[in-house]
Amino acid sequence: MALVTNATDFAGPPAVAALLDGGFRVFAHDTAFENRETWEQFLDGRDDLHPVVDNSPDTIIARVFEQANTLDAIVSNDHFPAVSHLPEGAPMDALRANYEKLVEFPFGIVQKALPFLRRQERANIVMITSNRMRLPLSGGAFPDAARAAANAMVRSLAIDCAKDGVVVNAVAPNFLYSEAYYPKAVFLETEQGREHITNSVPVGRLADPEEIGELIYFLATVRTRFLTGSIIDFSGGWPFGAPRPAT
């Protein structure tokens, strides 16, 4: 059994596909599934896939454990528009929104699930964060701060959960194809977008969603309890091979 949050975008679709292919029964959470047509399109005839449409961690976890006795893996797939704001005009509501979506919500999921996971004495938590703060950009204080906080949270949660057999790791992507951050219309279908990717990423392309699905599946099924608190960069060598600004 696995839970994937915010399943319709970012790393959600490849996480769901990889887990289903690996034999999991998957609870796919997304408030968009309130629309029946959206759910039917996402379901696409696949077996062992079940919707969870609640919007609070408490009710999400309650719904899952109403239908399942155990939960082997949680994939906390958290994303929010990375809007640029220069300091002098940055709205504080935007900072709070980043924090709520990228830090508070995933913490709530883990907090509400922990009593159940501890009784199991074994579970894998995979958080999808970001490594964007490795090379900060002008106007990026809000998303950079929230993503840095999420990565720090992973390390702390790993310590607190270790004694109970619950491991907590993160995949920190950048330059992953998704409509949330690298939409096809810009980065795959325009010369300027393709050139930006070629010049920025040592691998020379965006990551295919299936590639991050493979990594998520590995972390969701890892048997060793010694791999915990890891933040795994998934960015094609960025920023280590990124061009240095002229001095």
Image: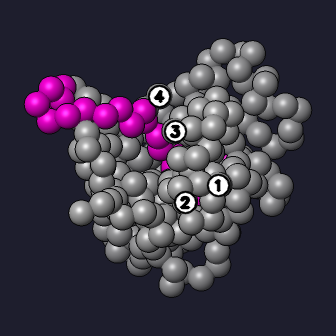
Q: What element carries label 1?
A: loop
| Amino acid type at mark 2 | Val
Q: What element carries label 2?
A: loop
Q: How far apart are marks 4 and 2 (CA)?
A: 35 Å
Q: Residue 55 carries which label?
A: 4
User: Height in image: 217 above or below 53?
Assistant: below
Q: Residue at x 50, y 56 (%)?
A: 200
| Amino acid type at mark 3 | Tyr
Label located before the other in sequence (1 or 3): 3
Numbered disc in front, either 4 or 2: 2
Q: Residue 72: image x %, image y %?
A: 63, 61
In the rendered structure, which segment of residues is drawn in magenta? 67-92
Label located before the other in sequence (2 or 3): 3
For label 2, the crowd category at 10 Å Cα-Cα, with few meaning under 14, some 14 to 19 and many 20 or more, is many
Q: Which mark is residue 181?
A: 3
Q: Residue 165: image x %, image y %?
A: 50, 75
Q: Distance between the residues labelled 4 and 1?
A: 34 Å
Q: How far apart are marks 2 and 1 (CA)?
A: 7 Å
* The furthest residue to the front: 247
Q: Residue 75: image x %, image y %?
A: 57, 53
Look at the image and tell me whether residue 206 can be seen.
yes
Q: Which mark is residue 205?
A: 1
Contact flag, marks 1 and 3 (Cβ < 8 Å) = no
Task: Based on the picture, tell me whether residue 77 belongs to the magenta stretch.
Answer: yes
Contact flag, marks 2 and 1 (Cβ < 8 Å) = yes
Quadrant location of the C terminus? Answer: bottom left
Numbered disc in front, either 2 or 3: 2
For label 3, the crowd category at 10 Å Cα-Cα, with few meaning under 14, some 14 to 19 and many 20 or more, is some
Q: Nearer the viewer, residue 109 or 128?
A: 128
| Amino acid type at mark 4 | Asn
Q: Residue 201 carries which label?
A: 2
Task: Based on the picture, tell me whether residue 48 belongs to the magenta stretch.
Answer: no
